[in-house]
Image (spheres, rainbow, N blue to C red):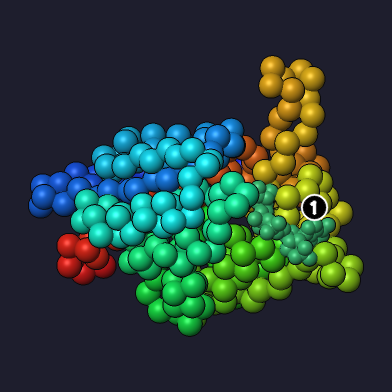
Amino acid sequence: MTARIIDGKQVAAEMRAELKAEVARLKEQGIIPGLGVVLVGDDPASKSYVTAKERACEEIGIYSDDNRLDASISQRELMALVEKMNGDPKINGILVQSPLPDGLNEPEVVLAIDPAKDVDGFHPVNVGKMVIGEKAFWPCTPHGIIQMLIHSGVTIEGADIVIVGRGNLVGKPLANLLIQKSNMGNATVTVCHTRTKNLSNHTKRADIVVAAVGRPNTITADMVKDGAVVIDVGVNRVEDATKKRGYRLVGDVDFETVKEKASLITPVPGGVGPMTITMLLYNTVESAKRAAGLDV
Ligand code: NAP
């Protein structure tokens, strides 16, 4: 079997078109969703993520308040900026790009963000609400994966899902969302990590395998069953002298061989990545609607 490729860019484009129409409707009611963006330092990867997020905001009509700060900023100044955005009615979502430079206390910054504006879904209040199944901002990458599965016609309810990786950004929240008693959950989930004994025993029986590891070729063809759905979250740089920049991006899955066995598979790049930004836009629009007292 050769897998159908799940085109993350296509699914993201469909969702962004819906969001753009919604933003236009909100504007007719005088509501303009706003995202406050904070980038500290000059890490090239962070810069490109922030630029992509701001461009995506612009494309669908979300106002973005761009704050690019020198790495020498103090914790106090950064906290003051977050407080200012907490109180700014034009800002519905606050995004502080991670990782912060050494010397800044990231957990403290996340805690300072008003949970009602925590569109990344990282604040412990939102994490706690998500775990107990209350309305909350869901973290963007796990939510994007679920939306991508739904848009691709994959049945989540009752599926045997194996997630490889238990990180706070992807593995852990995704597992929590997928076990919720809800129409986006109801799956049976196993979470694997470096201490898992015989990883392939788990992955081989899964209907859906999600790799969120950060290591190329962690999932090979012999580790998945025929017809499995394979979602590759990993983003890894491997040296490639044929590329101008000297490297190319690959996921955690050995794409070329696994695609011959899976029924559906996501590529890297062009799979999960575009969905992550889309769900940030989604959360910002939701936040604007909640702030305006619209029933969401
Ligand atoms: P993380 O917090 O470092 O977690 C990685 C997890 O992988 C850990 O739980 C680790 O196990 C597990 N692991 C590492 N090697 C393993 C192995 N050989 N076998 C089984 N498990 C193994 O990373 P993350 O933040 O979740 O990110 C994971 C990947 O997703 C990275 O490549 C990241 O760049 C990518 N990512 C992509 C997006 C996107 O939008 N496309 C968003 C977020 C992250 P232990 O816990 O035992 O150490």
- Tell me: is circle 1 under 8 Å from ligand 1: no
Residue drawn at the location 66% of the way across and 73% of the way down = 189
Asked if residue 114 can be seen in this view, the reply is yes
Q: How packed is label 1: few (under 14 Cα within 10 Å), some, or many (20 or more)? A: many
**x then y, percent, for residue 31:** 16, 52
**x then y, percent, for residue 205:** 78, 68
**x then y, percent, for residue 194:** 82, 64
* 202 vs 102, nearest the viewer: 102
Against 242, residue 107 (above or below) is: below
Against 122, residue 239 (above or below) is: above
Against 61, residue 77 (above or below) is: below
**x then y, percent, for residue 213:** 73, 55
Kind of element beneath mark 1: loop
Residue drawn at the location 31% of the way across and 42% of the way down = 65
Looking at this rendering, what residue extends furthest in the left direction? 29
- Circle 1 sits on which residue? 219
Residue drawn at the location 44% of the way across and 74% of the way down = 125
- Amino acid, disc 1: Ile
Q: In which quarter of the image is the C terminus?
A: bottom left
Asked if residue 56 can be seen in this view, the reply is no
Ligand 1: image quarter = bottom right
Q: In which quarter of the image is residue 104?
A: bottom right
* 26 vs 189, nearest the viewer: 26
Q: In which quarter of the image is residue 64?
A: top left
Looking at this rendering, what residue extends furthest in the right direction? 198
Against 36, residue 225 (above or below) is: below
Residue drawn at the location 39% of the way across and 63% of the way down = 113
* 105 vs 283, nearest the viewer: 105
